[in-house]
Image: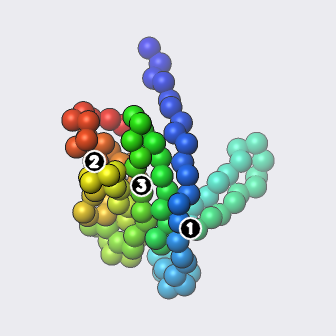
């Protein structure tokens, strides 16, 4: 049986800022993402903004993801925290999915991907 992939709507709450030492320094490759159209050779680069906040609604609850500088493995790479009402991740992690999953697990007492 095929897995159903669900796309959640993401809303930008705060744009955040760029830091020239991170976005244009030795760790710059970690602070930029690409959006490549596979039908042609155009590649668009967009920066990961420090302090950017986005909101996603899952199971009728709002989850707010904030981008920070640093996580447990490297203090110079992007880190992600998540908050939903009174639940929040105290330590930034390396990707937004992990941040959301950790809070989602506490709230609903279930594991999700």
Camera-side residue of 67 and 75: 67
* Secondary structure at numbered mark 2: helix
Q: How is the image coloured?
A: rainbow
Q: Residue at x 32, y 35 (%)?
A: 112
Callout 3 crowding tier (Cα within 10 Å): few <14, some 14–19, many ≥20:
many
Q: Position of residue 69 (x, y in %)?
A: 39, 73
Measure how far apart labels 3 and 1 are at the Cα level.
Answer: 13 Å
Give the labeled residue for mark 1.
15
Check whether the beta carbons of the residues at disc 3 and disc 1 lie within 8 A of each other: no
Residue at figure coordinates x 34%, y 55% from the top left: 83
* Element type at mark 3: strand
Q: Position of residue 95 (x, y in %)?
A: 39, 56
Name the image quarter holding residue 18.
bottom right
Task: Decide: is 84 above or below 79.
Answer: above
In the picture provided, is 21 more to the left or to the right than 96?
right
| 88 in relation to 68, above or below | above
Question: In the rendered image, which residue does mark 3 sit on?
Answer: 64
Which quadrant holds the C terminus? top left
Q: Is residue 2 visible?
A: yes
Among numbered discs 3 and 1, the one appearing first in the sequence: 1
Mark 2 packing: few (<14 Cα in 10 Å), some, or many (20+)?
some
Q: Which residue is mark 2?
A: 102
- Residue at the limit of the structure toward the top, as seen here: 1
In the image, taking residue 108 as reference, residue 41 lies left or right, namely: right
**Where residue 33 sits: x, y (%)?**
57, 61
Q: Is residue 23 visible?
A: no
Q: Give me the C-alpha separation between circle 3 and circle 2.
A: 13 Å
Real-space Cα distance between discs 2 and 1? 24 Å
Question: How many residues crowd around disc 1 within 10 Å: few (fewer than 14), some, or many (20 or more)?
Answer: few
Contact (CB < 8 A) between labels 2 and 1?
Answer: no
Q: Quadrant of the N terminus?
A: top left
């Amino acid at each position: 049986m095929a897995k159903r992939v669900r796309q959640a709507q993401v809303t930008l709450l705060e744009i955040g800022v760029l830091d020239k030492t991170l976005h244009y320094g030795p760790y710059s490759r970690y602070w930029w993402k690409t959006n490549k159209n596979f039908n042609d050779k155009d590649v668009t680069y967009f920066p990961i903004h420090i302090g950017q906040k986005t909101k996603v609604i899952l199971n009728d609850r709002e989850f707010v993801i904030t981008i920070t500088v640093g996580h447990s493995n490297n203090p110079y790479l992007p880190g992600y925290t998540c908050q939903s009402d009174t639940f929040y991740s105290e330590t930034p992690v390396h990707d937004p999915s992990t941040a959301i999953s950790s809070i989602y697990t506490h709230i609903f007492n279930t594991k999700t991907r």
